[in-house]
Structures are given as structure tokens and as C-alpha cells.
Amino acid sequence: MMFLRYAGYRFLTMLLTLAVVSVLIFIIINLPPGDYLSNQIAELQATGQAEGVAKAEFLRREYALDRPLWEQYLIWVGALPGPQGFSGLLQGDFGWSFEFDAPVADIVGDALWLTVLVNLAAVLFVYMVALPLGVLAAARSATWVDYSTAFIGYLGLATPNFLLALILFYYGHKHLGLPIGGLMSPEFEGEPMSFDKVKSILVHLIIPTFVIGTSGAAGMMQRLRANMLDELSKPYVETATAKGLSPTRLLTKYPLRMAFNPFVADIGNLLPAMVSGSVLVSVVLGLQTIGPALLTALKSQDQFLAAFVLMFVALLTLIGTMISDLLLVLLDPRIRYGAREG
Amino acid sequence: MSPLLEVQNLSIGFGAEPPVVSSVNFTVNAGGTLAIVGESGSGKTLTCRSILRILPAAAQMRSGMINFGVNASKQELLALSANDIRDVRGSKISMIFQEPMRSLSPLHRIGNQVSEVLTLHRNMSLVEAKKDVLAMFERVGFADVDRAYRSYPFEMSGGMRQRAMIAMAMVAKPDLLIADEPTTALDVTTQAQVLGLMKDLQFDTGMALILVTHDLGVVANMADNVVVMNKGRIMESGPAAIVLGSPAHGYTKRLFAAAPMIPEIAQPADPILQDDPILKLSNVSKTYVLRAGGWRKTIKVHACKDVTLSVQRGKTLAVVGESGSGKTTCARIALGAEQPDAGSKIIFQEDKSGVPVSVNEMSRAEKIAFQRQAQMVFQDPYSSLSPRMRVEQALMEPMEIHEIGTKASRWDKAAEMLHWVGLKPDMLKRYPHAFSGGQRQRLSIARALTLDPVLLVCDEPTSALDVSVQEQILNLLEDIRDGMGLSYLFISHDLAVVARIADEVAVMRQGVVVEQAPPETLFYNPRHPYTKALIAAQPEPDVNRPIDLDKVAIGAGSSASWPEKYRYEGANAPDLIQIEPGHKVRCNV
């Protein structure tokens, strides 16, 4: 019961944060002088194409770009009627992309779900790699196990992602026959879901997951190791030893459970780092995520597209933090009961 | 009869260093109690841990044998495989540790942690184990056993957690229980009850007990046999009555001399003159508002209520009470470190003819001047000195802050203060880690003295120290007080410590002063049940004067369970009434 109340409260604060974030995003995107259309008008006038100018002027009015910034914002959100009445984020209308000359929703469409998929796979990868290696490194601290995991970890942290991507593509293709680039074979693009398409996507996911996840996994492994080492020297571990628990059971039941808290709390930090980090990787790997779209949109001041992508990333992050907060409450009774340690 | 446990020629060391435990021999009989007594660094903890083989990874067992068991079941513990020793741990030999606050996992329910022993060693299902665990919980004195089973450690007080630890150690009915300073972290009344409980349980089950402690009083109450250790070697061993009755070794004698005791008093003292107060607290209250559950519900906690005390010039006023009694809050308020509730009055008067200032409503300039006059000595000398500052920096910093003197004169002053506290001026260049606990506490005192204060607030200055060091620090504090004409507000949980240094004692319980008198009067004629409990709970190093648990039980309970005359509920404490000159008791009239 208390948990549900907390979850509801946490959800409300998330919505509030999202509202604040939307303001920030809108302001930042509009900081550079001009907008996509005024840039275009200037260009058209310079080349003397008057009828193009008329069309651009029409679009400017159509999308309310001639109004003051705060009105533009409210129209974008959908809290104020625009030229076509209420149609903003709240109504599910994500706006128009000038660069691609199509509704934002159509352009991002599939890319949204592929972004979620790629990042989810990377998060899973991070946790599946960091958890056993971190625990092992702590349990066997100052032995070759510890040193070699640390070495691999630092290698993962230090290698630039795009370089890692190129290397993996080359060798993955040469020795394992893994596909190069993209998130599915070209013949499945735009096709409805089928078993073969899923298979193709999964095979294509292997290298991107690895590339995006390595540095996160390396960092998290080191943090988990440090937390575990702290916990291992606490008196309750001694109590458990004196009880006669076997080392494995002791490790997993007591210190791991304690070291898990920061591990879970990291979900919130991990998501934004990976989503923003994967933009570049997506460009290099040719992944059909929203990464490349964001890059183009920012370059050409395609403001509705850019704003939507940023909003989406912010939403992912906020959902990540909310999940980690809720998990922490479930995991740690001290937080659950709001107790302060004596 | 052959002994249950036999430790022979045990030596333990670290790296290439000389051994920290060397050639230790002792035996424990089935059902008997052996006390291992020593100060920090004596090797007593390593010795007892080596029995279960839970030494730190860097420790090496250099030599020795530990035989455990009688006749056919005899095992050499040091020769067992890792698997076999695990079958001994928790099952045949179990252990209780010093810090109940940290020795239980904070994330697992008490019931889970305790029943684990049974599911592990006795092949029980959780349901079967729960029955035994609940029975054990009842035995160790939990009022609501089901609730205790469901509780997390942080929901319990220190005493309750230690009871849970004892339940965990005893639930599998081991043959031997090793208790490493089991009551050191507890209040004296709780200590008495926990010791009593351990004794009862031992009587019920016939198990043997190894009690590791630094407190000769605890030994006298519990042990049949005693081993006195110092610097890794056994100094003296034998039956408790003999070792405690007529100690033969010089070290044992020194331990005895240093052990603080509540003296037997032949007649009460005269009341001390209350005509020249340096610090006067009148009706001081402090209420904290806590958020509990939800985010709108708040509860009020009275840290202290209507406290009226005065420190006389050149004298020591001691405030005694257990954790949570509000004594430290009083000290902080007296120093202006915390704002009391409205209506509280704290008056400080630098000298007899000086202008009285009100500590809780000072201007900034007055406050700075006041801070020069009143300094504090803290409890833990290990954490109250910055590890990154040299002694000279730590000692000169207060003078720099108050812009006193030149660099050279500050240095001279620092050197002079070191001399006062019995250290050498050439130590000024060192860092705190180069000093022992007692030396560090001398440094904290020296630092407090550099501003030439007239009032020193000492917050449990000796409770983190060994008994022999405690004795030295108390002597030092007395010398300084008389030599420099200081006045002390001395906070302590230990009546015996206070007995020797205080001119007047105020006993606090749950935020109120329950009894106040000069120490001699207090010990000669204690009136309040809580004071009586404190005195009764003090373990005396004399086998013929065991703790009177009934007296402890009467006074240590809640205020609602006190005898009619003193009883009250909640915050409705009766008034403090003067029953004879200089002796006040809080009672109904």
C-alpha cells in the first residue's frame, strides 16, 4: 500500500520534471538566432526564388514561428490553440520536420522502438557482464582474476566506441559471419514483423550492444567491486562466517545484497549516458535509431524534430530513474520505512 | 575431567613482524566460563577468533593446537578442512560480537538471520526453525516474539539487537559460546541485564562460555577462570576468585588500580556552594520535530526538558545518563552550538564581577568572545583530529581563527600546552596517526586549552579509551582544572568515572534530570530508582559483590513502571524537589 502511494507520488514528480525539461529543451533549441524557415527564406532570397519564399512564409505562419517564443512553446506542447487549433504533444501531434518535409511521427516512427530496443539490450548487457565480473573481482581481490577483469574493464573504458565498432565489424564479419551495419537486413526494412525479421534484428544487435555497453559495463563493474570490498569488511559478514555459511552463499546473501543498492541506483545514470553516447555509434554503425535523426535535426535547426527527439531521450532517462527509485524502495527496508541509521 | 576446549602454544603474527599473540595456553571446561581480560592490543580478540578460524586474511597462525570436544568427538580445529570447520561454526561453537549495531545485516529480517543457523546446521525447514527461534526469542526476553521475528535490525535498540545476536548464537544449542566484548557498546543498565541473561542461558543449557572483555567488573560477575593478557602474552591465569581477590602479577594489579569504582561512602558530603556560577542553565528544553512515515506526519521528541543546572567556578558538574538521555544535547546547548526552545535561559559569567551574557541570544561579536572562553573536548580522539593536519597546525589553528598573537607566540603557546598535557614539544611536527588513543586525547585537550578558556565541556572524554589510559586522562583533567582554575561540564555515561572527578552530579533519564547531588551524597543515599539502578548495574571487580539485577530492573524500565512515588507517564514528569540540602530528586509529593 505504502509502495503504491510512493509509486504514484514518484510518477507525479516525473511528470513535473518532464514539464520542466520540455521548457529547457525548447529554450535551448531556440537559442541560436533564426529558425529553419528564416534561414531558408534568407537563402531563397539570396538566390532570387520568390515563390519559394512565399511558401516558406506560409509555413512560418502555419507553424506559428512568427509568434513570441512563449506562445510557440505552448502551441508546441498543445496548451494553446495554434493555427490549426489545439495540436501539440499533449494531443499526440509531434510537429512537422522541415528538413525531411514530413510529420515528425513518420520520420521517427520505427526508429523510436529500435532505439529503445538497442538501449535496452545494452543495459541488459551491462548488468549481465558487470554483475558476475564485479562480484568475482571483489571476492578474489588482489589475485589474477581481479587484475585481469580490471584490465579488460579499463580497455573497454579507454577504447573509443567507434574504433571498437570498426574493429568488431571487421573481425566479426571475417570470422563469425556477422552482418555489417544496420539493425536488420535491407530486405526486411518496412516489412511487417515476422520470425525471420526478429532473427535478423537479433543478429544485427550483437555488435551494437557490445559497442554501446562496454564502457558502461566496465565502469559499473569497478563500482560494484569497490562497493563489495567495502561491504566485505563489515562486521555482519564476520557474523555470517561465524554462523558457518559457505563462502558462496554468504557472498550472495549478505554483501551482494548490500552492494546491490548503488548498482540499482545506477540505472538512472546509465540510460542517458548510453542514449546520448549511442548517437555517434549509431551514425558510425548505420543503425536506424533516432541518433542520426537527432544529429541532422540539430545541424539544420529542424526544431520540432530535434525537440521531439530530446524529449524522448529525457523521457527514457526519467523512466530509468523512476524504475531505479522504485526498485530501491523494494530492495532496502531502511528506505522503505524511512528510517535513519543510528 | 578432560576440558572441552584446550588451546596450546598458540602464536599468531602478521607478515614478518614478531607475533602479536605468542605461546598462549588455556583450557575451558564444559559448562564453565573463562574470561580473557586485556586492553586494546593485548591480542585477546585474535586469540578468541582463532578458535573459529575467522582471523583477518593477513594473519598467520604461527604455531599451536586447539583441541575441541570430549573423548571420542575430540577435534583439532586448526587441522580441520574448510568444509569441516564450517560445520563447527554456529553449530558447536558460536560467537557474539562487540557491536550489535553493525553485526547484523541491515537488509534481512531478524527472524531470517536467526533461523538461518538452524536451516544450515540442523537440517530444519523454515517452518520448523521458526518454532525454535520464537521459543529462543521468548527466552532472551523479547516481549512480542512474532514482531521481533519480522523486525529489521534498525527497528531495534542496541540492547535488543544484542539479545537477537545472543538468540542467534544460542539457538542451535552450541557447546561453547565465544562472546567478544558483548556488552561494551551497551549502556550500563542494559549491560547488566544482558550479562544476567547470558548467565541464565548458560545455567539452562550447560554450555561453556569464553568472555572476552576489558572490564574486571564484568569478569567478577561472570567468570570461573580468568586469563589476563597483555601484548600478546598471558600475564596471569587462574580461578576468578583468586586472580581478582589477590592479583599476583604487576599488570593485573595495575589494571585493578585503574578500574574506576563507585566508592563505599561512610557519610554524605556537604552541599556545594551555589554562589559563584560560571554557567547557569535555567529551564532549558529542546524539542526536535521528526518526520515519521508519510510526508506530513511529524512527531515531537523532547531531547531535554526543563533542565536547570549550574556549573560553579573551579568545580566540575557531571551530567550522567545513558544514550538518548539528552546529556549531549545539554552540552551542545550550553556551548551555544544548538538553539534551545523558547523560554530557556543560559547565562555565562566570565568572572565573578563580570557581565553575565546570555549564550542563546548573543551577538556575533559576543559569540566569538564566548567561544574563546568555552571549549570542548570530544569523545572520540580518533575522529576529532584531522588526519591531514600536523599537531602544530591543529593546536595553532584556534589562535589563528581568533587572531591571537604572532606566529612565533602561537607556536610557543602550542608547545606550552603540549607540555601541560604531558607530551613533548618535539611532537609538534607529527601527524595524529603517530599517536596512541590516549595521546590523541591529550592532544584534543591541549587544543581546547590553547585559547585559555575558563570553561571546558568534556563530552565522554574517556569512553573510547582503555581503563589504564582513562585513569591517566582523568588525572590530567583534574591537574589542569586545579592548575589553571578551569570549570568543567563533564558528560558521561559512567557513574564510576564521574565519582572521582565531579563535585556535583546530575543524573539524566529521558531528557529530564531525575536526581542531583554531590557524588558522595548520591552514592551514600541514592533515592531515585534510576540512580539506584545505575549504581547497582555498575559491575564491581569483586566476586563477592555481584550485580543486583532486581534493583537494575526496577529503575531501568520506563518511567511508568517506577515505584508510585517516582512514576509518571509521557512528558508529565513531576518536579525536582530538594529533599536535603544539596540533594534534589524528581518525585511526586
Image: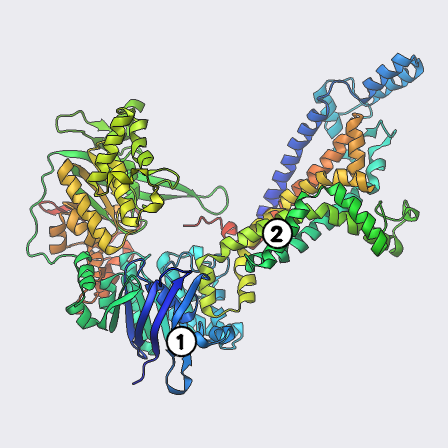
Of the residues tagged 1 and 2, which is closer to the observer? 2
Q: Position of residue B135 (x, y in %)?
A: 41, 72
| CA separation in Å, label 1 and label 2 | 43 Å
Residue situated in front as seen by the camera: A54 or A134:
A134
Element under disc 2: helix
Q: Position of residue B33 (x, y in %)?
A: 29, 73
Residue B347 falls left or right of residue A113: left
Would you name the residue on which mark 2 appears? A150
Residue situated in front as seen by the camera: A193 or B38:
B38
Label tally: 2
Residue B192 falls left or right of residue A271: left
The amino acid beneath tag 1 is Pro
Determine which of the numbered discs, if any, sits on residue B174 in the image.
1
Q: Position of residue B253 (x, y in %)?
A: 17, 62
Look at 77% across and 45% down and name the residue there. A165
Look at 46% across and 69% down and name the residue there. A243
Q: Chain of mark 2?
A: A
